Image (cartoon, rainbow, N blue to C red):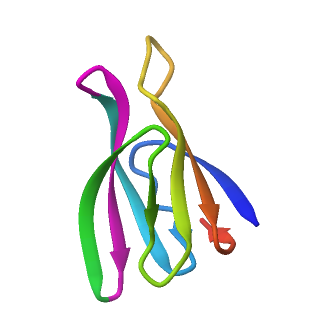
Amino acid sequence: MEQLVTVRQGMQPSFDGVKVGVVKIGLADGTPAIQVWIRTAGHARKQAFREGQSVDLPGAGTLRFTSVRPAAGETAASAVLAYDGGQPTP
């Protein structure tokens, strides 16, 4: 079952034991993008994604970056992540 999680910069949701640390939400070449750390006990990598892209989390399910909204005026940057493979934990 797909689970949706809304995140902001600095958050670190966990998906079936894989932490996803939100480093930055903004624009890359004019396109909404998000940079995250993907961490398990034996694995860590920093990677950037564009809205709509997905990644297979090591030993877990698939994480899709459904919506990426850079900051605009007084509205803080946020993103909606869709996880397919288990239950997210805060």
x then y, percent, for residue 22: 39, 51
Residue 59 vs residue 41: left or right? right
When the figure is inspected, residue 81 is found, relative to residue 51, above or below; the finding is: below
Q: Is residue 77 magenta?
A: no
Which residue of the protein is positioned furthest toward the top in this rendering? Answer: 73
Label tally: 0
The residue under the point 46% across, 75% down is 18
Magenta segment: 28-41
Could you tell me residue 76's position as x and y percent? 47, 27
**What secondary structure do most residues of the magenta stretch adopt?**
strand
Q: Residue at x 23, y 24 (%)?
A: 29
* As drawn, 27 above or below 19: above
Above or below, 27 against 73 in this view is below
Camera-side residue of 26 and 66: 66
The quadrant of the rendering that contains the N terminus is: bottom right
Q: Residue at x 44, y 47 (%)?
A: 53
| Quadrant where the C terminus is found in the figure | bottom right
From the top left corner, tell me how far across and down residue 87 is, in percent.
69, 72
**Quadrant of residue 31 within the rendered picture:** top left
Residue 79 percent coordinates (x, y)? 52, 39
Query: Residue at the location (63% across, 52% down)?
Result: 5
